[in-house]
Image: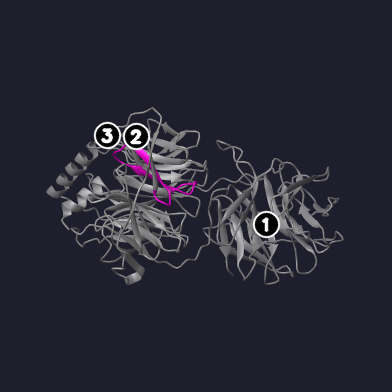
Amino acid sequence: MRDNDRTAVLLGKGTGMGARRRGKDARVGAVSFLPRRRRLFGVRAVRLVLLWAVACLVLPLPAFGGPAHPRVATVRAAPAAAGAALHRRKGFAFYNGISAPTGITAGPDGALWFTNNGFTSNSIGRISTAGKVTNFNDPSINSPQQIAAGPDGALWFTSAYSNSIGRITTAGKVTIYANPSILGGGITVGPDGALWFTNFSIGAGSIGRITTAGKVSIYTDPSISGPTGIAAGSDGALWFTNGGNAFSVPPVPGSIGRITTAGKVTNYTGPAINSPQQIAAGPDGALWFTSGNPFSIPPVPGSIGRITTAGVVTNYTNPSTYSPQGITAGPDGALWFTNYGNPSANPPVPDSIGRVSTAGVVTNYTDPSISGPSAITVGPDGALWFTNLLDDTIGRISTAVVVTNYPGPGISGPTGIAAGPDGALWFTNNGNPFSIPPVPGSIVRITTAGKVTNYSDPSISSPSAIVTGPDGALWFTNFNSSAIGRITTHGKVTSYSDPSIYAPQGITAGPDGALWFTNGFSIGRITTHGNVTTYSDPSIANPSGIAAGPDGALWFTNGGDSFSGIPDSIGRVTTHGKFTSYTDPNVSLPIAITAGPDGALWFTNWGLGTETPSIGRINTAGVITNYPDGRIYFPSGIVAAPHGKAMWFTNQANNSIGRFLP
């Protein structure tokens, strides 16, 4: 392949497109760079820049306004030859019968769907996990770019040159929604059930929204400049990459944009953000993006960036990351990306598939059959599937599926967690009343496969802890409304209030058939009929979590009170109201507690001052052990897995679920 062929494809196609009672500052990570040797370009660089400028100028400028006009067609499926695997080294497989594939996504039918953007075929393709390829052709499909599975069971795709958004059912029925303001690039499903997409334009552009009924809205802002990738964030907003304009005077730097479902735009800039391409939500609650521009003067090295929902940016790279393109969250808790190489470099940098852990460790996987990899997605088989733009194939790379964090829609400030009687995990969503729009509290169910269901009710107000009761329902505390809630496995909610209940937090099923909970300065007990009793003691100050121990007593976390000299501790109370308190330097703002499978009690430590957030363990003799980890961030709820020895916990600050295997 000639270098200028690779350049034309890169430029003309490719992506083408805190604590309630104690204040605790969020940790702010410093922007970091890994050193990398700058490559020198001669006459070839000038030619590549000119090619890039020409490729960008042929894109039409967007016009705004006007309704979308649907055009419907049922297309004839054109079966391609079943894709025999071309290579199977290092877990790869490749399939043909395709023409310049660009975007790819997992469909609702268990197959992968992709866009064909080639000279021989402008179509939508489908490939089964066994490698069978089918192409759907229609005259209305024109230069399709990115594709996403919609909430309506269909596939939605963008078109670069036809000013339209397309929809195709799994049966092959195509509908085109035309609008002069559409110049689509990336596309994703938003938290509001609509499709959100980027309208690319050099030095300008906009963000679009289209409902499943075809209604189009366009959002503009002076900070939007050459947007390409877009993804739904863990904060209920849409995040997108702004490529900027390196040739304007003065140059417009790249940036990361955020837009709420109400259309409010925020822009994040900085030296760590340079020519960002695609973006994806990570399992750590942050957004991860690819960036770099080998054709700018001077060249911008390729890298993988991470931005928190608070706007804190970190940058990761290695010598094998040259020009990363697509990125997606993998089933193993890491981010996977496609990487264009540079065969002319010394030494040459091959095309590859990259993996970056949430700790920033970058690994690249190469194979001779990877050629111009572009988009990437997780398949229903647990592997990563990607498009090879330059040799018209679809690639697959396997990975060991070890998932420890499950982010998903419906998770907002998760706090308490419990194993339900139905074999699933149930947790409380604290919500976010200060977001736009506000996110109410709710009760959420998540299967061990990661499927999330959300239950809301007006009586649910900042729920904290949750536990399975002796009556087969889930019981939880409502902190803000000072009430105890009950929810059945079918989602029916009941609320119990009493003058003695004040800001309850933890709750557990006691050995006496009642529910026990923590109050502001006392321990409470409620029967399954709603009768309430409270117990107080001088050692109690700001108790949080509570659990029934294997010794027939109740164990709870005690936040302490520095003004009255009561230290942080782990407390124990018998069903007759007798108290014992255990202190230790490793107990620092403990929150939740639960009985583990090893006969001990396990609890979460938020950490205070110089203390690191951690998972703690105390046996019934009062001996405490501490397990810190840099990925633990404001841990709140904790529970033993339904089967096995693992402990599952909620990371409240980054909207994720953690798993610890002792």
Q: Quadrant of residue 607?
A: bottom right
Over which residues does the magenta segment extend? Answer: 149-172
**Callout 2 crowding tier (Cα within 10 Å): few <14, some 14–19, many ≥20:** many
Q: Secondary structure at mark 3?
A: loop
* Residue at 17% over, 48% down: 45
**Callout 1 crowding tier (Cα within 10 Å): few <14, some 14–19, many ≥20:** many
Q: CA distance from mark 3 to mark 2?
A: 11 Å
Residue 431 spot, x, y in % from top left = 61, 44
Which sits in the foreground, 32 or 99?
Answer: 99
Q: Which residue is mark 3?
A: 60
Q: Which badge, 1 or 3, comes first in the chain's sequence? A: 3
Q: Quadrant of residue 591?
A: bottom right
Residue 205's disc is 2
Residue 498 spot, x, y in % from top left = 83, 44
**74 left or right of 431?**
left
Front position among marks 3 and 2:
3
Q: Quadrant of residue 437?
A: top right
Q: Which residue is mark 1?
A: 592
Q: Amino acid at mark 2?
A: Gly
